[in-house]
Image (spheres, coloured by chain):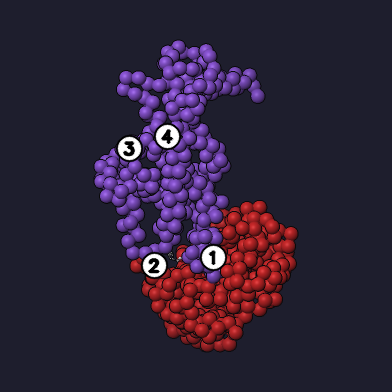
Chain colours: A purple, B red
């Protein structure tokens, strides 16, 4: 290595450190607010808390305070996991059919699935509200899972089909000659190979449900059914915002997301690059 | 008994006729090699036999049973794909056992067959690896093993060696020939490689644009090409063609000559052509020899177009009139032969093939029958 390149190396590092700092600063700020006692907004630029206390977290868990974070965390987990499961189960079979079988109306149904993705979710809020009301599923987590599935299933089908299309057709053909039925090809050959894509798909469905606020706030009136985003929003009042509780809640919301990311990381990278390079 | 009979096979894809009426029979235990230029329909024919594609017309019989309406699994065939198509998530053992597991064979029987086949293909040490941990040659053997464990009536191979390097290809080719003799099964084998075709084939079938040009033992195709396409396809370097006109000299006792621009060759007595007939002269490289002196009726004079030295042997392209011929010669004897230099070649006229020359032949003009023995060309 010559000198100029060593200098460039150092400059490069400095740039990366600066960028990382810029990205981390707001996060540190949220942590500061969560760890500072009280609900006031502290405008000082320092990202470090002056006094460290866990009072905000205690309040949220309902320890001596008024929070019900356990309940809200539970609701959110139920909704997000159920949405991911529904998305995965129905989209895996559908994507296999769209990718591998030739049937009447295949193109049309695919286009239809795509069309459902073109409307912003909020546009469907009122029709969905009326439907849920008819089905007596307002104020229910089941109803919310159904609503989330209407958007996540078509997306999952498309993304999974895209991945299955990259798996060589000869694998199916070899299996067919080996005597496998379509179901066996799906179950024993395609599904194990689609694991990275399944992980990405599940993660997407999970996150879309986990983060969703507007529809949940529209369909859930009963505070006992609140999911985390709706609960969080309740700390932001018209005249008064409980900044400490809000920040602590935001951290609690992001922890499961990070856990899921770490658990699926290996598959995620494989899934995102899948199709780029064969083999 | 597992002979394969193809009767009037037709296949259309996207409005194109891919196969236009193929009639072909493969005897029990025979290895038929399917050759032809790229895109002529070899893979399609194989896939039709396997049941991966539906026929547009015709019948397929395997072992006296009509199978063209049966799904692949019930045809009792195994196919080795060019890309091998091994299941990436399964070990070698699982890959080979997959078909047997689906048939619900007893575990012991499956294990026994897999071990047996692995031993035959020297895969014993690799059974617990996954395909990505294998070399190309090893994958190729696993693909073969997956076919063999099933003990099918018919094996179908689609260019199984084309992904291997030359040395490995040579070795696997020898093994494959041995394997065929050991198993005694019927095989249909697609290849681009002429050496593979010539050495492995009991019989060879040559396709061109969805039509069967000729089928028979490899030497028969080589020595008695039924048309100009067959003549030009087999042999490396290939047969050269010179446009000529037949001349019958009254004085020469009815002997035929082939006259073209820059040459006049005497045809062997077995050909009886009427005067003025337009013909293609097919000349194989091995029938041309470097010869400064030769009888006038056996001499081709021209100028050197190109010289390719391949080691011991060299190929010389000679421009004769408005055509070219390729000769094979010992490189050491060529000296410093430069393009443009004049050169004379002696033609072994007994080796000449003669084809009709007409506007509508399209490269597959039929061979003209020779009356005498030795050159029984069929007019197709
Ligand atoms: N799905 C398809 N639709 C339309 N035409 C097709 C389709 N598949 C193949 N073909 C055409 O069929 C012809 C035969 O294809 P095939 O793959 O059988 O050729 P091949 O002899 O195996 O060639 P190669 O030696 O290159 O493998 C080709 O001209 C190809 O373009
Ligand atoms: Mg092919």
As displayed, is residue B348 above or below residue A186?
Answer: below
- Tell me where residue A176 appears, x and y as whole percent: 52, 67
Disc 3, SS: loop
Instruction: From the image, state whether disc 1 or disc 4 is nearer to you.
Output: 4
Q: What residue would you read off at disc 1? A: A175
As displayed, is residue A83 above or below residue A245?
Answer: below
Label 3 neighbourhood size at 10 Å, few (<14), some (14-19), many (20+)?
Answer: few
Q: What residue would you read off at disc 3? A: A221
Chain of the residue under the numbered disc 2 shown in the image: B
Mark 3 in CB contact with mark 4 (< 8 angstroms): no
At 63% from the left and 65% from the top, the residue drawn is B96
Q: What residue would you read off at disc 2? A: B13
Q: Residues under labels 1 and 4: Cα distance?
A: 46 Å
Mark 2 in CB contact with mark 3 (< 8 angstroms): no
- Tell me where residue B144 appears, x and y as whole percent: 63, 66
Q: Are marks 3 and 4 on the same chain?
A: yes
Looking at the rendered structure, which numbered label has been put on residue A228?
4
Q: Is mark 2 within 8 Å of ligand 1?
A: yes
Considering every residue shown, the one lying at the far front of the view is A64
Disc 2, SS: strand
């Amino acid at each position: 290595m010559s000198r100029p390149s060593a200098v460039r190396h150092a400059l490069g590092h400095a740039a990366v450190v600066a960028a990382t700092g810029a990205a981390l600063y707001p996060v540190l700020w949220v942590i500061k607010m969560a760890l500072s006692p009280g609900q006031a907004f502290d405008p000082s630029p320092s990202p470090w808390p002056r006094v460290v206390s866990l009072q905000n977290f205690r309040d949220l868990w309902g320890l001596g305070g008024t929070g019900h974070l356990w309940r809200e965390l539970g609701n959110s987990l139920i909704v997000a996991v159920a949405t991911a499961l529904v998305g995965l189960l129905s989209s895996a079979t559908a994507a296999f059919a769209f990718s591998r079988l030739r049937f009447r109306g295949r193109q049309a149904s695919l286009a239809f699935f795509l069309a459902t993705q073109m409307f912003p979710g909020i546009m469907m809020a009122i029709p969905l509200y009326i439907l849920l009301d008819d089905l007596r599923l307002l104020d229910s987590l089941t109803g919310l899972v159904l609503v989330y599935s209407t958007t996540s299933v078509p997306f999952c089908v498309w993304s999974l089909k895209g991945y299955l299309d990259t798996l060589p057709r000869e694998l199916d053909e070899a299996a067919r000659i080996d005597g496998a039925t379509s179901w066996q090809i799906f179950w024993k050959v395609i599904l194990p190979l689609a694991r990275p894509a399944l992980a990405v798909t599940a993660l997407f469905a999970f996150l879309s449900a986990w983060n969703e606020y507007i529809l949940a706030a529209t369909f859930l009136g009963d505070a006992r059914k609140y999911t985390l985003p709706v609960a969080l929003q309740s700390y932001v009042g018209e005249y008064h915002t409980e900044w400490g509780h809000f920040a602590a809640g935001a951290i609690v919301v992001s922890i499961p997301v990070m856990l899921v990311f770490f658990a699926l990381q290996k598959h995620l990278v494989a899934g995102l690059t899948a199709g780029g390079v064969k083999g | 008994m597992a002979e394969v009979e193809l009767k009037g096979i037709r296949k259309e894809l996207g409005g194109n006729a891919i196969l236009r009426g193929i009639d072909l029979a493969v005897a029990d235990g025979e290895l038929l090699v399917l050759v032809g230029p790229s895109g002529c329909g070899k893979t399609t024919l194989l896939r039709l036999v396997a049941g991966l594609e539906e026929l547009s017309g015709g019948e397929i019989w395997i072992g006296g049973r009509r199978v063209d309406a049966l799904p692949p699994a019930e045809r009792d065939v195994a196919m080795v794909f060019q890309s091998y198509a091994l299941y990436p998530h399964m070990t070698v053992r699982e890959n080979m056992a997959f078909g047997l597991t689906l048939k619900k064979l007893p575990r012991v029987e499956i294990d026994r067959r897999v071990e047996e086949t692995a031993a035959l293909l020297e895969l014993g040490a690799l059974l617990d690896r996954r395909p990505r941990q294998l070399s190309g040659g090893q994958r190729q053997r696993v693909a073969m093993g997956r076919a063999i464990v099933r003990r099918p009536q018919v094996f179908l191979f689609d260019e199984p060696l084309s992904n291997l390097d030359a040395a490995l290809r040579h070795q696997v080719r020898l093994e494959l020939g041995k394997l065929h003799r050991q198993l005694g099964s019927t095989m249909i084998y697609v290849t681009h490689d002429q050496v593979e075709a010539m050495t492995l084939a009991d019989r060879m079938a040559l396709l061109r644009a969805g039509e069967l040009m000729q089928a028979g033992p490899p030497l028969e195709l080589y020595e008695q090409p039924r048309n100009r396409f067959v003549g030009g396809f087999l042999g490396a370097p290939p047969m050269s063609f010179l446009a000529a006109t037949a001349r019958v000299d009254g004085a020469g006792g009815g002997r035929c000559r082939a006259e073209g621009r820059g040459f006049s060759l005497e045809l062997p007595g077995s050909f009886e052509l009427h005067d003025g007939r337009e013909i293609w002269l097919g000349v194989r490289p091995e029938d041309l020899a470097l010869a400064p002196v030769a009888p006038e009726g056996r001499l081709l004079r021209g100028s050197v177009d190109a010289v390719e030295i391949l080691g011991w042997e060299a190929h010389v392209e000679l421009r004769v009139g408005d055509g070219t011929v390729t000769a094979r010669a010992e490189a050491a004897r060529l000296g410093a032969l430069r393009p443009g230099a004049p050169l004379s070649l002696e033609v072994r006229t007994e080796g000449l093939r003669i084809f009709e020359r007409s506007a509508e032949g399209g490269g597959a003009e039929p061979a003209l029958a020779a009356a005498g023995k030795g050159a029984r060309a069929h007019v197709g």
